[in-house]
C-alpha cells in the first residue's frame, strides 16, 4: 500500500452534484481539499441523462456565491408560476414569481449543464481530484481519518489522510457502510419516467404538477427551446407497471400522458428518449460521526415530487462552507455539532413535507381524496399557508445559510 504525504483538511467522498459543489465552495478558502470520485466519466459525462433539476431561489444564490451560476444561466429556464392540481377534481393551487417578489420561482436546468459547470469550475480552481478512485475503507483516529482508495481492482489500494471526511457519496453511502452506521429506507414502489415532450401550446414559464392516484406527473418548461414549447416530463408510476409503460411506443405513451395530464397545453406532439429511476427515501440515521459529516443524498435521499433533493444538498454544503471559514480544525467536535444543529430542522421539515405529499396523493382511500382537495383549496385561498409553502419551496423557509440570503458571500 502506498502512503501519500499529507493530511488534507477536507476529503470529499463523491463527486456528484453536491460533492463537487462543496469542492468548488471550499476552493475559495485556504484549505487543502481532495475530491474522490469513483466513476471515471463524472467530469465529462458520456452517459445520456435527460433529467433537468428545478433549482430554487436559494440554490441560485448559492451557485452565484460559489461562482458557478454564470456558466449555467444560459441553460436555465425560468419558472414563472406553478400550477398544482389533482386529476378528477376541479380547482388548482397556483404560485407566481410576482407573489414571491422574485424574477422567477426557480430555474429548470439540465443536470448535465450543472455537472459540467461545476467540474469546469473545480478544475479551474485547481481542486485535487482523485478519479477514478473508490473509497474502500477508512479508519478514524483522534486527529485525522485514514481513507483507503481503490483506483483499479487489479492494483493495490492507496491511502490518504484528512482531518475531516465529508460523505457526498449518495444514497448508498460507502462512508456510512464503512462506519457501520444505519439508514432508514422506505421503498415507495414507484419509478419516475423522465423524458422531453412538445405540447401544441407554449408553456409560458408555467410548471405543472398533476396528482394522479398512481403518482404525480410534472410538466416543466424545458431550457434552450427557441419557441418555448418543449417541456420536461417527470411521470411517477408504480414500479409494478413500469414494464408496461416501457413497452408503449411513442404514440401510445404520448396518448397516455395526455389523457392523464389533460388539455391545458393541447396535444403532445413529440417525445424524447425515456429514462426511469426507482424511487425511495433513504435517511441517514445520523448526520455526523467522529471527524465525518454527511451531505446531499448521503444524508437524505428524497422522492423527487417536490424537487428538493439537490436544493437541500446545496444548503448542506453552503452551511458547512460557512462553518469551515472560522474553525482552525475542520474536524473539531464543536464544528460537527454546529453543522448538525443548523441542518437538522431544514432537513426534517423538507423530508417530512415530501414524504407526506407522496403518501397523501398516492392514496386511493375515499376520505383522503376530499382532504386532498381541501388541502389544495386551502393553499389557493389561505395567504399565510400559501406563503409558508412558497418560502419552503424557494429554500428560504428555515435557518438559511448566508450564501442563500440576498447578497450572500462564499
Ligand atoms: C427523477 C429525479 C428528478 C429530480 N429532480 C430534482 C429537482 O428538480 N430538484 C432537486 O433539487 N433535486 C432533484 N432530484 C434529486 C437530485 O438529483 C439529487 O438530490 C442529487 O443529484 C444528489 O446529488 P449527490 O451528489 O448528493 O448524490 P449522487 O448524485 O448520488 O452522487 C454521489 C457520487 O458519489 C460517487 N460515489 C459513490 N460511492 C463512492 C465511493 N465508494 N467512492 C467514491 N465515490 C463514490 C458516485 O459515483 C456519485 O458520483 C431529482 C432526482 C430524481 C431521481
Image (tube, helix red, strand yellow):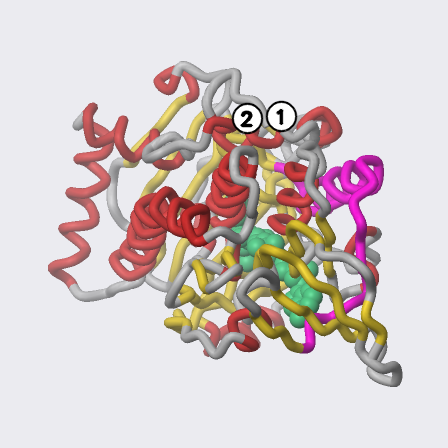
Side (left or right) of 250 relative to 177: right
Q: Position of residue 129 (x, y in %)?
A: 80, 53
**Which residue reaches farthest right?**
155
User: Residue 97, percent across and down?
Assistant: 43, 20
* Span of residues in magenta: 109-136
- The residue at 78%/75% (across/down) is 150
- The CB of the residue at mark 2 lies under 8 Å from ligand 1: no
Q: Is residue 354 above or below residue 396?
A: below
185 or 329: nearer the viewer: 329
Q: Quadrant of residue 264?
A: top left
For the residues labelled 2 and 1, say whether their Cβ atoms are less than 8 Å apart: yes
Q: Which mark is residue 64?
A: 1
From where the camera sits, is residue 390 visible? Answer: yes
Residue at 58% from the left image edge and 55% from the top image edge: 164
Residue pictured at 52% horizontal, 71% vertical: 176
Q: Quadrant of residue 46?
A: bottom right
The residue tagged 2 is 61
Q: Quadrant of the N terminus?
A: bottom right
Q: Residues within 10 Å of mark 1 (few under 14, many from 20)?
A: many
In the rendered view, tell whether residue 152 sits above or below residue 348: below
In front here: 108 or 361? 108
Q: Secondary structure at mark 1?
A: helix
Question: Splitting the image into four quadrants, where does ligand 1 fall?
Answer: bottom right
| In the displayed structure image, the side of residue 140 where residue 156 appears, left or right | right
Q: Is residue 308 left or right of residue 367?
A: right
**Outermost residue to the bottom:** 154
Q: Toward which corner of the image does residue 184 lie, by quadrant?
A: bottom left
Amino acid at each position: 500500500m502506498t502512503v501519500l504525504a499529507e493530511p488534507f483538511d477536507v476529503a470529499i467522498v463523491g463527486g456528484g452534484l453536491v460533492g463537487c459543489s462543496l469542492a468548488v465552495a471550499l476552493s475559495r478558502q485556504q484549505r487543502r481539499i481532495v475530491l474522490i470520485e469513483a466513476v471515471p466519466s463524472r467530469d465529462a459525462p458520456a452517459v445520456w441523462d435527460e433529467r433537468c433539476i428545478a433549482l430554487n431561489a436559494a440554490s441560485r444564490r448559492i451557485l452565484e456565491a460559489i461562482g458557478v451560476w454564470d456558466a449555467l444561466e444560459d441553460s436555465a429556464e425560468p419558472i414563472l408560476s406553478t400550477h398544482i392540481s389533482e386529476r378528477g377534481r376541479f380547482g388548482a393551487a397556483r404560485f407566481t414569481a410576482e407573489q414571491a417578489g422574485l424574477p422567477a420561482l426557480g430555474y429548470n436546468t439540465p443536470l448535465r449543464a450543472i455537472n459540467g459547470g461545476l467540474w469546469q469550475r473545480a478544475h479551474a480552481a485547481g481542486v485535487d481530484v482523485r478519479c477514478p478512485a473508490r473509497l474502500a475503507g477508512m479508519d478514524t483516529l483522534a486527529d485525522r481519518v485514514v481513507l483507503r482508495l481503490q483506483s483499479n481492482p487489479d492494483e493495490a489500494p492507496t491511502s490518504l489522510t484528512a482531518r475531516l471526511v465529508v460523505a457526498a457519496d449518495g444514497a448508498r453511502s460507502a462512508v456510512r457502510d464503512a462506519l457501520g452506521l444505519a439508514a432508514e429506507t422506505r421503498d415507495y414502489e414507484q419509478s419516475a419516467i423522465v423524458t422531453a415532450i412538445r405540447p401544441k401550446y407554449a408553456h409560458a414559464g408555467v410548471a405543472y404538477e398533476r396528482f394522479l392516484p398512481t403518482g404525480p406527473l410534472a410538466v416543466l418548461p424545458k431550457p434552450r427551446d427557441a419557441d418555448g414549447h418543449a417541456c420536461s416530463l417527470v411521470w411517477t408510476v408504480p414500479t409494478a407497471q413500469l414494464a408496461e409503460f416501457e413497452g408503449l411506443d411513442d404514440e401510445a405513451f404520448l396518448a397516455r400522458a395526455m389523457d392523464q395530464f389533460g388539455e391545458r397545453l393541447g396535444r403532445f406532439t413529440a417525445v424524447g428518449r425515456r429514462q426511469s429511476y426507482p424511487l425511495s427515501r433513504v435517511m441517514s440515521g445520523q448526520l455526523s460521526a467522529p471527524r465525518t459529516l454527511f451531505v446531499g443524498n448521503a444524508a437524505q435521499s428524497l422522492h423527487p415530487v417536490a424537487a428538493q433533493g439537490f436544493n437541500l444538498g446545496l444548503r448542506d454544503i453552503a452551511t458547512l462552507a460557512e462553518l469551515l471559514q472560522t474553525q482552525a480544525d475542520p474536524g473539531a467536535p464543536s464544528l460537527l455539532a454546529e453543522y448538525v444543529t443548523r441542518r437538522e430542522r431544514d432537513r426534517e421539515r423538507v423530508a417530512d413535507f415530501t414524504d407526506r405529499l407522496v403518501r397523501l396523493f398516492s392514496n386511493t382511500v375515499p376520505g383522503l381524496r376530499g382532504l386532498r382537495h381541501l388541502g389544495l383549496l386551502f393553499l389557493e385561498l389561505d395567504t399565510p399557508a400559501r406563503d409558508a409553502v412558497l418560502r419552503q419551496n424557494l429554500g428560504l423557509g428555515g435557518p438559511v445559510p448566508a450564501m442563500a440570503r440576498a447578497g450572500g458571500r462564499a
